[in-house]
Image (cartoon, helix red, strand yellow):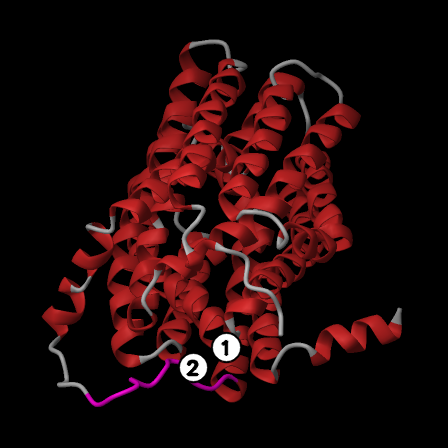
Amino acid sequence: MFRKITSTYNEFPRTYWVVAGTHFIDVIGNTLLMPFFALYVTQKFDVGMTQAGILLATNSAAGLVGSTIGGAMADRFGRRGIILFGLIVSALSGLTLGFVDKFYMFYGLSIFVGLMGSAAHPAHQAMIADILPPEKRAEGYGLMRVISNFAWIIGPTIGGFLAAYNFLYLFLSDALISSITALLVFRLLPETKPQPKEKTEHESLWQTLSGYRVAIFDFPYLAFIFASILMILVYQQMYSSLSVYLRDVHQVDPQFYGLIMSSSAVTVVIFQFAVTRIIKRYPPFLMMAAATFFYMIGFTMYGFVATIPLFIVAMVIITIGEMIGMPTSNVLAASFAPEEMRARYMAVFGLVWAVPSMIGPWAAGLIFDNYDPNYVWYIGGVLCVVAIIAFYSLHIKLGAREKFQRVEEI
């Protein structure tokens, strides 16, 4: 076992492990808070899920703008500084959001945090692609998921107990952890932005931003983005609507919700690396269709089952899809991107998360407040079927292209 761990460590460069270690610490802070955010808003401000969904949607819309600017800045100035900026904003937001007691002030501050805090996301994704050669990226992104989910074992478990005692401690803990991560990034993480292969005229800021038109008019890439949005519309319910659904419909308290979420993390920690090495052998768009199939089964189950053990079974099924789809989608996004536009393509890839974050909680809130809450899961199953068809169509159209073939290790 020790030999296997050592072998895995030696397969990746030191900089990758610095990124992985700081990411692990930061995710603990995020997962202390994120799964309980909707619970906090509905309880603290006595609002319905529709209003909480609108809050999450506007936060995501602001995040889309922030990541768009951040992606351009990361391609122009580098990854490290943008990541530091995002961590500092996260720390400051934790110190303020937890003390706000007026909903309109919380609303406005949440939008500001979404705008500023999301700037670092494309830089982080691009940095991993910078560090690793193409044949190692699937395993690199997969291993990053193992690290993230190991943090998920810790974060929601602690967060559930803190939330039951006082939600304020969630915000303060997130702020402290973001500050520690920023210090580590500043001291240990070098810049990874690729140097141009040949000298080119220094482009203006406007030219950097206008470079997004290349990604926007890359129609095969947009087709991939569209199919992924449908898939993540369903997946995102795990982080927004599921906690409120389990509380209000099945009287599941935060501690047990943390246990359900941690079951997903445990599954990823144990199986993700092995799964990633297996899926490397198969066409990536077909793997995306397979991932969506598992989402369809798992999320639809929530509309039919009513016990905590079955909720955990459904979560494990969802997690199988997650282990297949998440590293594959990152590799596909990197494969579409020209090297000099990697962060900007990753920013556009952020639509896959931003659009569902804008639409999903709001739409689920409307259903929760006006109709049978189980409709959320039935509709999710239908969306997954559409996404499966879309990914299979992409396989037919694009699967034969060299850049979408699995790269064999040398």
Image height of 345 relative to 83, above or below: above
Left/right placement of residue 207 relative to residue 373 reads left
Q: Position of residue 237 (x, y in %)?
A: 50, 32
* Up/down of 307 relative to 15, above or below: above
Q: CA distance from mark 2 to mark 1?
A: 7 Å
For residue 309, above or below residue 329: above
Numbered label attached to residue 131? 1
Dominant SS type (magenta): loop
Quadrant location of residue 91?
bottom left
* Pointer 2 residue: 192
Amino acid type of the residue that numbered disc 1 sits on in the rendered structure: Ile
Say which amino acid is labelled 2: Thr
- The quarter of the picture where residue 204 lies is bottom left
In the structure shown, which secondary structural element does the residue marked by tag 2 occupy?
A: loop
The question of residue 21 being in magenta is answered with no
Q: Nearer the viewer, residue 135 or 343?
A: 135
| Secondary element at tag 1 | helix
Badges 2 and 1: C-beta atoms under 8 Å apart?
yes
Horizontally, is 41 left or right of 161 in the view? left
User: Would residue 345 be found to the left or right of residue 182 on screen?
Assistant: left
Compared across the picture, whether 290 is left or right of 362 comes to right
The magenta segment is 189-199
Position of residue 224 measured from the top left corner of the image (x, y, whole percent): 37, 43
Query: Which residue is more in the foreground, 284 or 212?
Result: 284
Instruction: Please identify the quadrant where the N terminus is shown.
Output: bottom right
Q: Please tell me which residue is depicted at 60% across the width and 43% down the height of the picture.
A: 322
Q: Is residue 174 visible?
A: yes
